[in-house]
Amino acid sequence: MRIKAKLKGDKTEVKVMMKHPMLSYRQAKKKGKEANFIVYVTAKNEGATVFEVSTSQFLSKNPYMKFYFKGGKKGEEVEITWVDLKGNTKTGKAKIK
Amino acid sequence: MQRRKFLGLGAGIFAVAATAPSMLMAENYRKALPKVWKIKNDEKSKGEDLTGVNAAIKAVFGSDKVEEGKIMLKAPEIAENGAVVPVSFKAEGAKKIALLQSADPEALVAIFDVPERGIPDYSVRIKMQQTGHVVVVAEIDGKLYKAEKKVKVTVGGCGG
């Protein structure tokens, strides 16, 4: 997972690229694999949830997202966690620049 | 007597535990609303039929009474590659935002909950297997607002 967090005035901009094939049911069937895709993503800043999304098979492969949240300070951490359909989960961290 | 006290205490703790998650913790709509992700689009309409999209809006928000406005939606007019279609939207004051489209087998793409420190200004990349309408619905002050844009897809993104 690649995360970039940058302070912009009174808000923090976060760009994240999650590594995941995001195989839809149709793509999976063609490839003879099982469908699997990220279904839920959250981001925290110093323990407080600042971003939250439930997702589907129709996000692109290796999903990219950009979002903003209020506050945040340089040097603080942004922690992003995703869960996929099969229950795999991954957490990544980045410091706010 | 002691047993009764114990049971009362137990019920109290249970009540707190049962209400706390919905207030403090985030909502995973994959678990909370498992059926809404299966609402189908009419693929034969070539992305022109929004019946599935409207049904999904109703399933997510409990109503499909939407007004135009308050949402800024950006999506390309023509997407050469349906596998990666950049979509971004802003909806000031929104508490919940749903992203939908009429091009893929099912209508719903994502549901965003906006936490207290969250800012409803999001960009994502989606797959569209054919030309269709991208629809964003946001709940602002208890009302539903909608923005819609047609995206022409030249190479579909769901064939893999």
Image: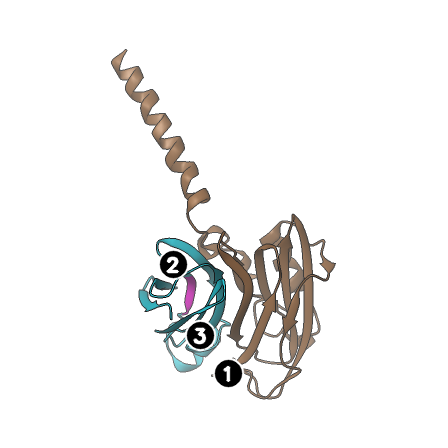
Which chain is tinted cyan?
A: A
Q: Quadrant of the N terminus of chain B?
A: top left
The total number of labels drawn is 3
- N-terminal of the two: label 2 or label 3? 2
Tint applied to chain B in the drawing: brown
> Label 1 crowding class (10 Å Cα cut-off): few <14, some 14-19, many 20+?
some
Looking at the rendered structure, the kind of residue marked 2 is Asn
Cα separation between marks 2 and 3: 21 Å
Image quarter of residue B55:
bottom right
Cα separation between marks 1 and 3: 17 Å
Provide residue A89's location: percent of width, then percent of height: 32, 64
Between marks 1 and 3 in the image, the one whose residue lies nearer the viewer: 3
> In this rendering, is residue A52 above or below B106?
above
Give the secondary structure at mark 2. Answer: strand
> In this rendering, is residue A20 above or below B54?
below
The disc placed on residue A45 is 2
- Residue B127 in view (yes/no): yes
Callout 2 touching callout 3 (CB < 8 Å): no
The disc placed on residue B159 is 1
The residue closer to the viewer here, B46 or B145, is B145
Query: Badge 3 is on which residue?
Result: A63
The magenta stretch is A37-41
The residue closer to the viewer here, B103 or B142, is B142
| Residue B138 appears left or right of A84 | right
